[in-house]
Image (spheres, rainbow, N blue to C red):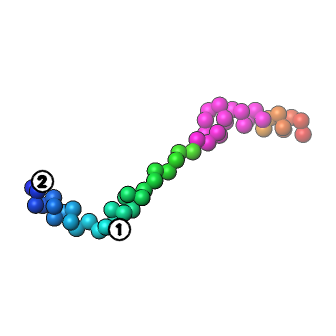
Amino acid sequence: MKKEIFSEAIGKIDTKYINEALRYIKPSRKVLFYKKPVGKTLIAAIFCICFLFS
């Protein structure tokens, strides 16, 4: 890309998009217990025990 074309393209970017990009915070990933293989087994075991005692 030529320097002039690149400069023209950068000049056309609206400042609100630049400010939005500067303030962007990456969302944290939540690890859910029931999505793990051990979590599903544990929940099924607790459900069975509750079902047997009721």
Q: Disc 2 marks which residue?
A: 1
Q: Is residue 28 above or below residue 44?
A: below
Point out residue 50 in the picture as x, y percentages from the top left corner: 84, 37
Q: What SS does tag 2 mark?
A: loop
Q: Quadrant of the C terminus?
A: top right
Q: Tell me: 32 left or right of 15.
A: right
Amino acid residing under circle 2: Met
Point out residue 14 in the picture as x, y percentages from the top left corner: 29, 68
Amino acid residing under circle 1: Lys
Point out residue 9 in the picture as x, y percentages from the top left corner: 19, 63
Q: Which residues are magenta?
A: 31-46
Write the residue at 16% across / 61% down.
7
Foreground residue, 51 or 36? Answer: 36
- Give the prevailing secondary structure in the magenta stretch: helix
Write the residue at 61% across / 39% down.
35
Q: What SS does tag 1 mark?
A: helix
Point out residue 33 in the picture as x, y percentages from the top left corner: 64, 39
In primary-sequence order, the first of circles 1 and 2 is 2
Write the residue at 73% across / 35% down.
44
Q: Is residue 41 above or below residue 15?
A: above
The mark lying in front, picked from 1 and 2, is 1
Q: Disc 1 marks which residue?
A: 16
Q: Is residue 20 above or below residue 1?
A: below
